[in-house]
Each structure stands twice: as structure tokens, then as C-alpha cells.
Amino acid sequence: MGQMSLTPQGKESHFGLVYQMLAGCSKVVGEAFFPMMVEALAHSLSARWVFMCVLTPGDPDRAATLAAWDNGPIDNFEYDLRHSPCADIVTQGACCFPDNITSLFPRDDLLKEMGATSYVGTPLRSSSGQILGLLAALDEKPILHGDRAAEILELFSGRAAAELERLMTSSINERLGRIVEDSVSEVFIFNGDTCRFELVNRGARENLGYSMDELRLLTPWDIKPDFTRDEFLAFVAPLRRGEVPNLLFETAHRRKDGSLYDVAVQLQYFAGVENLFYASITDITDRRRAEQARAHLAAIVASSNEAIISTALDGTVRSWNKGAEKIYGYAADEMMGRSVTCLIPADRKDEEDRILARISKGEMVSNYETVRVCRDGRHVDVSVNVSPIYNTSGEIVGASKIAHDVGERKRAEARERLLMGEVNHRAKNMLALVQVIARQTVASDPTTFLERFDERIQALAASHDVLLQSGWQDVPIHELVRSQLAYFGADFGQRIRLSGPDLRLRAAAAQAFGMALHELATNAAKYGALSNDDGAVDISWQIVDDDTADPVFELAWTECGGPPVAAPDRRGFGSTVIERILKLSIDGEVDLDYAPTGLVCRARCPARKVLEKHESGTGLQKGKAANDAAPGLRGRRVLVVEDEVLIAVEVAEFLKDAGFEILGPVGSVKQAIELLDTEACDVGVLDINLGGETSEPIAEWLGRNGTPFLTLSSYGVNDRSPVFANSPHLDKPLRPAMLVKELEAMLAPAE
């Protein structure tokens, strides 16, 4: 720097020149001001170097020049403030080092490279006092008048700081303006007095469909149908009075085309000179729709009769709806945070691990039928659908489970299977009965086969009509009698007289009595009391109870007034039905008295065997069978268990003709066990369904005692209980040769 030795008049003259140079460069604004300013300062101080710099954002130890002079303009550069006199300016304020600057800052390599001797500098401060940068001058010669140099530097630094702050502020505002204009959020600025829009950003303009010129004529209540002018002004009044810092609310905006969309509004008010409202608005249409969808879904979940629950990947319950409460019996507060494994039976514990393993892979489990345990210990059949639950990052965080109670469907399916099995069983039994009737009818009198066979089938059908009307349950006796003697309907009360209390026969007994009554009526019409015009038949029944034994049921058929009666020369099918089949069916006594004055038939049995009101328990006795039958197939003892008496009798006759000795036939578990406890048995032929029970106890008894058996049933081989699994099986209707062949194979000596 020049060695200034100004007189006061010289000083004033020099400062006048300085002001002129400063005023000249001040005519320029913006970034072009800074190069002109450093040139003017260099001339004012007669300095070789002058530079103006700003602090580097984020790195307070570095600075970057905005304008630099070295006996002429030079390129801008960055430099390190550490160990330099510029660092003192930033930390201590204006400073002047008139000589030997390099010795004072020996670690400042830039000073050494420049060859500077003196230094004067001052900070550039904003209007708030914040240091924005610095202004410095350096020279190869010492400074003689440091205080004057500092004054001149201060003149220039004030103007430089003001322009720098203006540019920075302008830059920030421009950037902020661009950000606001391009923001996806809607921004509205409107006048504090008129409420007319002054600035609306592009996002809002495009969403509303208005131009800026159109919006300047509108107010908030013009686009907010939820507000009138007075309502809006009253709503924002607390904000204008400064009672609240801002207002947050949700409303709707109306577009130029009349359509609406939901918005969330944050409204601020800037009082004073600005007198403006600033509204930042977010379009929440999608959010509202999502909320409505979630609410709709939540309502469906809450009201669903299906169990809808969610769990974490470790099985911890996170949600539990009313349907889950209804199906499983647990309240939501009992299950929240608890493991869902409490619903899983002990024998299915690994099931949940397998399901969650699939869910963790992003798989779904659909219509998986399983069993769950309720709060009261009941097991419930359910069909389960399981889906993965994803978080916002797309990660699987849990499982959604929907369980439908399929217990009723399972029970309906079981009832249907049972019904179909029962239909099949009864159909095959009926075919077997028809088969027996056909064989026995043709064996009795081949010449009248068709007539007699038709009559017997009609009698069987009549019994079944009565059974059907009674739901295959108990049958009123008087209805059964009338059904079998329907041909003589006009004679009821005159030649055919009925007497007895209102009693109901069990289904099996009704079928046997029906066939017996048919045979008696047919015989009376051909040879007995109903074969002329004078005869009559009395049919009576009663219960005899003398308090000394079980009550006894008696039914009597008494004929009178017909032709003289004599015992037949041979036994036909009719006699077999009456004497043998009826006797076996009722487990009692049947007596046929061929008195000259008319046939008398009396049937007597324990009332509990045939009447629905006299049921008693069936106690099973245990014992051993004497398995000591003689060797060879002839004379081997066969137990026949069959509740359809006609079929039982025919099976027994076939086996007897084949050389077997018959035990029975019997039609109940009790009868079979009692027989086995006292008689030796080599093999058994078992019907599975014995009316109200099955032959399983008999099969178990035979199995324990090592006695082989086969099943002869209307049920298929795959429908049998496990107790029959290892035994041979034959289907009804009966094929006698197959039965004999199977028994011979079972009894053949092992090779």
C-alpha cells in the first residue's frame, strides 16, 4: 500500500474520492457489483490485492471468493482459513497487520506464495449481525496509516454486506418460490381484508381447473362448499386475533367442473404489513377413500359370523373379531397378545408351524379343513384361509386368518352318508326278503307261484306302508292288522272283530307280525272262517302283567263258523312264517291249534321285545365258548346272527343243507352272547345292523376267543367298523353257494 501522509485537508480530499468511487460502483447491483467494488477498493487503498469472500456452507474453515483483484481482476478461488489472518476476522472482527504479516502467520502458505507484507480486513455482517463473509486488502509494502485504511475498508464493507444479504435473501426467496410453485401440495395466499386470492401455486391451479387470473376474483368460500362467507370469516377470526397460531381442519374443494375432492388445510395468518393468509393444503381424497374402505372392511370383519383374526409370525394374536368370539368362545381381551396355539389340539401342534412357514414364503393357505379347541374344551370343525400380511415396506409381518365353522356341514354330510347307508341297507335287505319269499313260495307250490308270490309281496308292501307312515319307528297294532286284511275291509266290525288296547309294535316285530297276519288271512280265505258266508275271525291282543315276572304281550287269532279244520299233511311257507319266523322274531312262543271248530293261533312273548313302551337294558354276560368241535367240515357249528327273520331262517336252512350245525338264528347281541356263553361255536355269520344296535360286541367276543367270522350285510366292505376289518364280507342279497364256499375256506385246516 502507498505510504499515506495526508494532511487533514488531504485526508478529506482523499475520502471524497473514495466516496465517489463507491457511489460509482453502487450504481450496479447483483453479482456484477462485487468485481467493481474490489477494483474501486484497490484503487482507494493503492493495494495490490483485494478479495471479497463468503464462508463455505457446512465447512467454517474454508472460504470462497466472490470477487478478487491482483493488480487486475483474477479468477475466484477457495482457500483454507486455518492459521490465516482471515480466521481472526471471522472470530475477532476487523483487524489490521501493517507489516511483517508472514512472520505473524508463518503457517499461512498463501501469504508466502503471494509475498504479502501487510493485511487489513473486516467481516461482512447481515442486518441481524450474522457473519456472511469478509473483505480484505493486502500489499507488498507496509501500511503507514492503518486506521485510515480500516475506515475506507469499513465504508466498502457496509455496502458489500448489504448487497450480499440482498442477493442471498433474493436467492432463497426465488428458490422457495420455485419450490412452492412446483409443490404437489396446494398453496393459497389470500388477502387479509378482502380474502381474494393473490397467489395460488400450480398444483392447486391444475387440481381446481382455474387460471391464476380467474382465481384472483375468487375467495376461499367460493371453492369450499362447506362454508358461507360469514361462516368462513367467523371460523378464521381467532387466527386473525392471534388467539391461535394456526388452524388445522379438513373440508372439501369444488373444482371448476363442479366435482369435489377432500382436503386437509393448515392455515396461518401474517399480520402487519403483509396482512396475508397462507394456506397449505393436501388432497386427501385417496386417504379418505382408503379410510372409508378400511372402515367398511372393519365393519364387515366386526359383524362377520366367521372368525377373522390376525397374528404375528410367531402366532401372537393381534386382532380378534366377534365371529372368533362366537366360534371359539374367547373374548377379544382374553386372546389379544396370546398365542393362537391355544386353539390347536395337542395332536395338531405342528400344523401351525407348517402354516406359518408357508405364509413366511408369501404363500396362501386356502380352504384348509382342520379342528380347533374352544374355550369350553369342545372341538369344532373349521375351514381355514390364511394370507400373509405385509407392512408398507413390503415385508411379511403376520398372517390373516379366516375360519368358517363347518361343523354343521360335516354333521349334514355324516347324516347324508348315514341316510344313504341306511337306504342302501334297507334296499338290500328288502331284496333279500323278496329273494327268500320267492324261493320259499316256489318250493311250496310251483303251480301257484306267481299268484302266491304277488300276494306276499303285496303284504310286505302293506307292512312297509305302515312303517313308512310311522317313520320306520313304532307301528300301531290296529293299523298293521287293517293293512294286512285290507281286502276284507267291508267285513271289519262284523266278520272280522278287533279288540285290544292302543299299543305300538317295534318296526322289526311289526314286519314279522304283518307277514304272519297275511298268511293267516290267506289261509282263512281259502280254507277257514272267511271261505264261506258265516265264519268270523276274532283278533285280540293284550298285556299280561301279574307282578311276578316281566309283562307279557299276547296276540290271538281265533276263527269260528268256517268249514271243519284239520292239520295239514305238510308244512308250507305259510306255516313256516307263522310257527318259525314269527317265533324267532318275537323271541317267544307261537302255538297253532287246528281245532275242528276253527284255527286258533296264539303268540306270546316278553312285552319289552315287541312294544315300544317296554324297553329294557341288555346286559352282556361274559364266558368262554367250547371250541372243541369235531374235525372236518360236517357238523361244524355256525352262529347265525340276523335280525330279518326270513333271511335268518333261509341262511340257517342253506347252511344246514350244506352239513353245518346251526346255532340260532338270533337277532340281537344279548341272544348271541348268551348262546356263545353256553354253546360251542366254530364260526360266525354276522349281520352288522341289528335294528337299534350293531353286532360289534359279538365280533369282539368271537375275536377274543379266536373264533373266525364273516359279515353278511347290506353295508359295503368299506363302510364297516374297524372291529370287522380283518374278517371276510359278503353283500346282500344272499348267494348261498358263495356263503358256503367262504365258510369252508375259513374252516379249512392250515397247510
Image: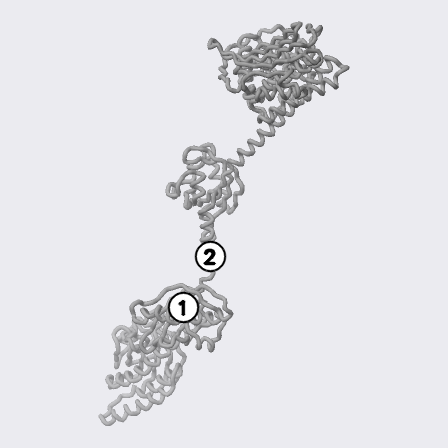
Helix, strand or loop for disc 2: helix
Q: Quadrant of residue 16?
A: bottom left
Q: At label 1, which amino acid type do we have?
A: Phe
Write the residue at 43% across / 73% down.
200
Residue sitting nearer the eye, 79 or 725: 725
Q: Is residue 186 visible?
A: yes
Q: Nearer the viewer, mark 1 or mark 2?
A: 1
Q: Quadrant of residue 539?
A: top right
Q: At label 2, which amino acid type do we have?
A: Ala
Residue sitting nearer the eye, 493 or 17: 493
Q: Position of residue 529 (x, y in %)?
A: 67, 12
Q: Is residue 703 visible?
A: no
Circle 2: is it few (<14), some (14-19), or many (20+) Cα within 10 Å? few
Q: Which residue is mark 2?
A: 290
Q: Which residue is mark 1?
A: 227
Q: Quadrant of the C terminus?
A: top right
Circle 1: is it few (<14), some (14-19), or many (20+) Cα within 10 Å? some
Relative to 47, 577 lies left or right: right
Q: Residue 297, relative to residue 323: is it above or below?
A: below
Estimate the spatial distance between the alpha carbons at disc 1 and disc 2, rounded to whole Å.
25 Å
Q: Residue 581, relative to residue 90: is it above or below?
A: above
**Rendered image: mark on residue 83:** none
